[in-house]
Image (cartoon, rainbow, N blue to C red):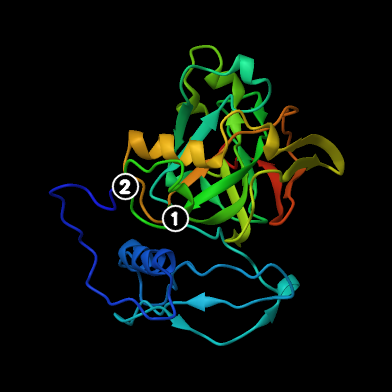
Amino acid sequence: MSTGVPGGHDPRPHRSRSPRQSPAEFAWSRHCDFRRRPAHPSMPSRSCDRQPAGGGVRPTTHDRRSVGEFQLTGATVPLEQARLLAPVSPSKVLVVGRNYGDPATATPDLVINLKPSTAVVGPGSPVLLPAESAEVRFEGEPAVVIGRRCRDVSEAEADRVVFGYTCANDVTAWDIGEPGGHWTKAKSFDTFCPLGPWIRSDLDTSDVAVRTVVNGELRQDGSTKELIRDVPAVVARCSRLMTLLPGDVILTGTPAGAGALHPGDVVSVQIDGIGSLVNPVRTHPSTP
């Protein structure tokens, strides 16, 4: 396994790992440093800390007027009073397709599309239906969050580069993707990649229930045991195609039952061991 690009230069500032940090947590904190962008001094950055699995939220904030570490506030607020952002800000989102069902129907190689980072939104943020599409579909699925820079990872080593797991909704403009196979185009609209509500770092993904509920009606009901290629196989194959960076996200595939979204819908992706990702659906404000 390679943890860097041969001959490449790592632009992130040098930092020493705390004895209390695992290598993945250290890589994640370095990624947070690297992802900072100049902004107006009054604008806080997005939290890069993992969210707890219940009870309350311990926010992690960074004052952009400071050039040092992200600062823990020490404050705890009830979960119902917190507005959660997407738990990760990836450089890229890889979307695995046709990865559920009968292994006899498996494609010769992993089907992968891309979403841009600008498609990512958090829990509670609306999915905006664009004027260009008349058929936008939900696709609930588990998402892998990469924890360290890597390339050419074996399946046996895949767990070492994974930071954790979260819920994802692979929103897709089906009528744009299907006619000519332009699936990256169909998946790239703003708000088309809800992620959250937090990252679970110790999930056994061998048999996890995955459900999608729309307006209170169960629409998808599957399990990761139905994956044609399991999570280690997916991570390994993706890492052979391209360098994966800390914070990158891989959507592992969706079970049967994906369907159309309409303005006013509320869609909830529910994954056992992680939680529920809930987003309302709205018409894009630019739509006539």
Quadrant occupied by the C terminus:
top right
Looking at the image, which residue sits at the far bottom?
Answer: 74
Does the image show residue 169?
A: yes
Q: Residue at x 52, y 85 (%)?
A: 73
Residue sitting at x 84%, y 38%: 218
Q: Amino acid at mark 2?
A: Met
**Mark nearer the N terminus (1 vs 2):** 2
Residue that carries the numbered disc 1 in the rendered image: 160
Q: Residues within 10 Å of mark 1 (few under 14, many from 20)?
A: some
Mark 2 Cα shell of 10 Å, populated few (<14), some (14-19), many (≥20): few
Q: Residue 10: image x %, image y %? A: 20, 59
Residue 162 position, x and y percent, is 48, 53
On the image, the x and y values in percent for residue 93 come to: 46, 42
* Left or right placement of residue 254 versus residue 96 in this view: right
What amino acid type is highlighted by mark number 1?
Arg
Give the residue pinned by disc 2: 1
User: Residue 273 versus residue 58: which sits nearer the camera?
Assistant: 273
Instruction: Kindly check if marks 1 and 2 are in contact, taking CB atoms under 8 A apart as contact.
Output: yes
User: Disc 1 versus disc 2: distance between alpha carbons?
Assistant: 10 Å
Secondary structure of the residue carrying numbered label 1: helix
